[in-house]
Structure formats: structure tokens, C-alpha cells
Image: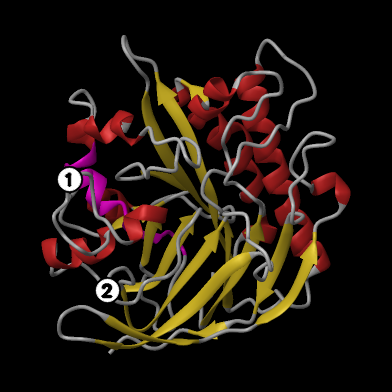
Amino acid sequence: MPNYTKVQLVSYGAVTSTPTRVLAGDQSNRYYDDLASRGRTLCDVADWVATTSASSLADPETLKIFVAPEFYFRYGGPSDPPAVLNDSYPDGEQLLPRLSEEILKPHFAAEGFADWVVVAGSMFWHKRGPAHPSYFNTTLVINGGPDTALTPQERADNADVRALATVGAATTNQKALMSNIDYAIGVDRSEWDASLNPMFRLSFTDDEFWRWHVFAAHGKRGPQGQPLVFGLEVCLEHIVAYAGSDSDVGLLRTMEARVPDQPEVDVHLVTSCGMTLNPAFGIAARDDGYAMIVDGMQPGVPPLPWPNADVRRVTRVQPDGRRSVGASARVLSTRALPANLQLGAPGNQHNPLDSVAIWEPVPLADVT
């Protein structure tokens, strides 16, 4: 693989602020069928983008970063009551590996995706409990291309909590805390956040949880051959680090203080539903690094540009950690997806229509 000199956002706009029905009937295996349908649609969208925007994505020294919004994987019907829809996938820890192993990883292992990193939005799911469910929100990152086998050194580093983690074919991250709109807009279920449940709380506070929010991806190197360092947050993590935090900064900014010798972030990625990039409290990319966001909140009236996405370059890191940023990229093209790639069963398509924007490549600065 080449040393990448530029990065390029491909933003996938799909309204995720309310559940979307993708099934036409009440299948006995409906939770997996729903999840698989969304996964295959995401793969087909990536194929469509790669084919129809080939000239805009042709540079082999540009790393393409394809991002879907938070809650892309949230169960939606077709005939269940709102409580079931918003509880989403039960026992999702059994479903998520199938989504990854059976659908996403095999698809993006193709040579045509060797210059891609894919953030497949997030999956909202729950574990049943005696009194109420516990909610999880898990994002999945796919490292594109067939060359994803970790080197012995990368495997050793992954076993060392002090070292930079490296993604092979894929990795997951748990959202650190649940927003008051994550269950449903206007219905706050954040008290049932899994991170507040004593059974799961430790998994949201240990070093392994923290470290995988900053990672390299095997084979994805910067201009000087160094590993590109990615930071990843899900929505509210961008401005609040964890449940009960008394800090006024996001998770990656908290990690800067908690692990001061961690590698600087080249590309800070945010998948969200109701968030904007926040240079004062959230953005954690290095000087001359980038922050990128793709958001699934339904735009208001008059409608905002769709897909709702942004790319910012960090122009200065202030002594207190705040970032000064500037606009760094323009949108080259925005197109609504064809009817067969619109997420949702007939009569349940989104407004605005699912669309994809191709952003211009932006240069990666040398590390000094």
C-alpha cells in the first residue's frame, strides 16, 4: 500500500433520528434480518459510490474515509410498538459479530476498497434485565482491502495497554454514555444506560475501553511512512467523556490529559445524530490534523445541506487544549441514492432522501 498524502471524506447521509422500517413482514428471525438488510445496503451504497464517483476517488495516495451516521443500525419494525422499536436489537452482542464477520468484513476486503476506512455508523441494542433493559451503542470500523493481517509487532502492541492499538480487519467501540434522546426524541431513558449498570460499568472505565478510541489501521500510513492515527467518538462523547464526568471536554480530549504520551491524532472522526464539531471542548486532532463528522439528525426547515457533514483542519492547538480550526474542504458532489439503495421498506423512506457527498481530498501534513 502507498504512503497516503491526502484523506477524503465520503459522507453517507441517512436520517437516523427516528427508527426506520426495512422489513416488509414479521419474520421469525427479524432482528438479524433487519441488521443484515442494513449492512447489505451500506455495502451496496459503497459499491455505488466507488463505481459512479470513480474519477473523484481515483488517486491511490488518497485515503477514502466512508462514514455513516450514528444509529444506522437501529431496529425498525415493521409492526412492533414504539417500546420494542426503541429497545432495538435484544442481545445485540450475539448479532454484531455476525454483521461484521458475515457481511461487512468480507465485502470490504475486496482490493477495490484497499484505500478505504469505513465507519459503519453505530448499532443501538440492549441486554434484557429483570427490571429494565440496559442500552448499548456500538460503532464498527472496517479497515478496507485484503491486507489486514497484523504483524507480530502490531499484535504485541495490541496486548500492551500502553501502546497504540492497531486495527486489523475491524474493530468496535462502545459509546461511553447515552444521550437523553438516544432512546427516542422526547423520551429520556438515559438512566438505563449500560454504563450506569454495575454489571457493565467497569467495561466502560478500564484502559482497554479508552485506548481503542485512538488507533492505527494496518497498512494505512502517512506521508512519511508512519501509522496514521485515528480518533473516534460517537455523538455525545465529543463533548462529555463518560457518565458522571465532571470534565467539560469530550472523550478524546480527556484522553489527552489522561494519557499525555499517546500519539497525536491525525484524523478525528465523529459519527453522530445531533452533534456538531466543537473546537473548544471536543476536537482532538493535532496541529494540521483534521476533524470529520457525519450526522443523522433530520434537518429542520429550511433544510440544511444534506448529508449533514463537516471537515475542519486544526490550525492551532491552544495551551489549554482548545483547537483553532478552519474550513478545509469543499463538497465536490452530492447525489441522492437511487431508489433501490434508499434505506427503508416501501413507504418508509427518509426525508430528505438518503444521499452521498464526495468531499475534496485534503493534504496530510508531515509529522515534525
Please provide percent x and percent y for residue 202: 17, 34
Report which residue position mark 2 lands on: 264
Taking depth in this image into account, of 100 and 114 the one nearest to the observer is 100
Mark 1: secondary structure: loop
What's the amino acid at mark 2?
A: Glu
Taking depth in this image into account, of 158 and 353 the one nearest to the observer is 353
What's the amino acid at mark 1?
A: Gly
Please provide percent x and percent y for residue 203: 22, 35
Residue 199 in magenta stretch: no
Residue 281 vs 330, above or below: the answer is: above
- Specify few, some or many for label 1: CA neighbours under 10 Å numbering under 14, 14-19, or 20 or more: few
- Residue at mark 1 to residue at mark 2: CA–CA distance: 26 Å
Q: Is residue 193 visible?
A: yes
Magenta stretch, residue numbers? 204-219
Picture quadrant where residue 241 is located:
bottom left
Q: Is residue 338 left or right of residue 265?
A: right
Q: Is residue 3 visible?
A: no
Q: Quadrant of the N terminus?
A: bottom right
Mark 2: secondary structure: loop
Taking depth in this image into account, of 339 and 3 the one nearest to the observer is 339
Residue 172 vs 331, above or below: the answer is: above
Please provide percent x and percent y for residue 310: 53, 73
Mark number, residue 244? 1
Residue 211 in magenta stretch: yes
